[in-house]
Image (spheres, rainbow, N blue to C red):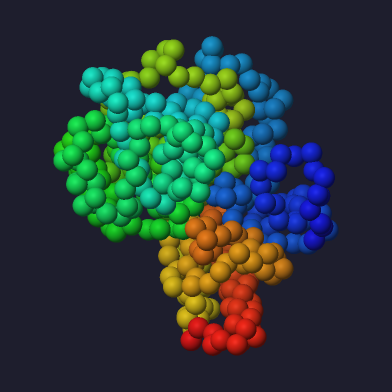
Amino acid sequence: MAEADCHSPLVNSYSRLPVTFNRGEGARLWDTENNEYLDALGGIAVCALGHAHPAITEAITQQAQTLLHTSNLFGIENQENLAAKLCELSTMDAVFFCNSGAEANEAAIKISRLFARSKDISSPKVITFDGSFHGRTMATLSATGNTKVHDGFAPLVDGFIHLPYNDLAAIEAVAGKHDDIVAVMVEPILGEGGVVVPDDNYLAGIRQICDKNNWLFIADEIQTGVGRTGQWYASQHLKPDVITSAKALGNGIPIGACLTRGVAATLIQPGHHGTTFGGNPFATRVGLTVLQTMEAENLPARAHSGGERLKNKLTEALHNRPEILDIRGAGMMIGIELDLDCSRLVSIGLEHKVVFNVAAGNVLRMLPPYNLSDDEIDEIARRVADSINELCHDNQAQTTANGSQPKP
């Protein structure tokens, strides 16, 4: 793998790994030295159809030859069509388009402020949760329940109450103490927080609490949405007031969407919010093609069945490892929690020619394409298990060299 450039003209905002990919096809990537990898990360939940999907390539090519941008001062047919398809699949009422997940969440927060104004609440609060991640803008990083994301950016945006995740009693407790809460914003599964799957009744309980207190229920489905968990949206059966979506919606083309229902669909009026690039003819043509392709190939169902196969194969391969604390997830969103320092694990994975990342410090996270073949699923499981086994072996050797006993 090539050495990282110590004199890069780029701002030093990422700790980049010493590999550069320059080609992809399906679930496979090739680096600049022509090494082939299996991609179990999908650009962090983005490339749900894999790389260089023919339908997406065709849509990109045709739209680039037709019209890229006009601005939202005019009607955009592709935007109307994509909004209609999203509302059909999610059972929501209306959509605001933007360019990213952070912007979609920013729109949701602004909707909560407009909702507060309609209730004559001057200092509104939104409940969010420890371990959550909602974005890097000032409002969304303030909403995020991770102090590392906050570091260096004080003063934060006021108006967020951070509570423990998967704890309905904690929400009930603050409901009785505050009359200025207007919304709950929650990830159906914590993504950056370590692929944490809540109890079965958790999201339904939040919906009930919101109904009882006249709060908005905002589901941040940037990572779980567009079929990843086996449903179009993991929360849609609970009828959230707002669902935010991005990542897999564009399969690599930047797009975000804030889906709304009921009163939440009526609050933004001309002048309240806007975007230069959001919902342009190009991005919305690609987004519509993504949804049509997933629908035609029944890929949410494949995400469910393929994810179950991947979890089972991983469980079989790693069942004797005491360092494994848990293998969990839903659909093609899987985490392996280890009782080890995982700082080297991604690099070890690259040596085994498999791409994944680590969330929350010790959770190997996989967010692969939905249309993996069974053989690709089995091979990913083998390479991931080999990577974990190597880390565990190295840990045991290091522990023994230091004169202490390795973990049993």
Residue at left offset 59%, top offset 30%: 283
Rendered location of residue 346, percent (x, y): 63, 63
The answer to whether any part of residue 194 appears in the image is: yes
Between 125 and 312, the residue placed more toward the observer is 125
Which quadrant, please, contains the N terminus? bottom right
- Location of residue 186 by image quarter: top left
Q: Is residue 138 above or below residue 330?
A: above
Q: Is residue 85 above or below residue 134?
A: above
How many numbered dots are placed on residues in this image?
0
Residue at left offset 80%, top offset 43%: 8
- Location of residue 9 by image quarter: top right
Rendered location of residue 95, percent (x, y): 42, 28
Between 395 and 282, the residue placed more toward the observer is 395
Q: Is residue 6 left or right of residue 132?
A: right
Residue at left offset 56%, top offset 86%: 404
Residue at left offset 49%, top offset 27%: 97
- Location of residue 240 by image quarter: top left
Rendered location of residue 338, percent (x, y): 50, 71
Q: Is residue 261 left or right of residue 321?
A: left
Q: Is residue 349 left or right of residue 317?
A: right
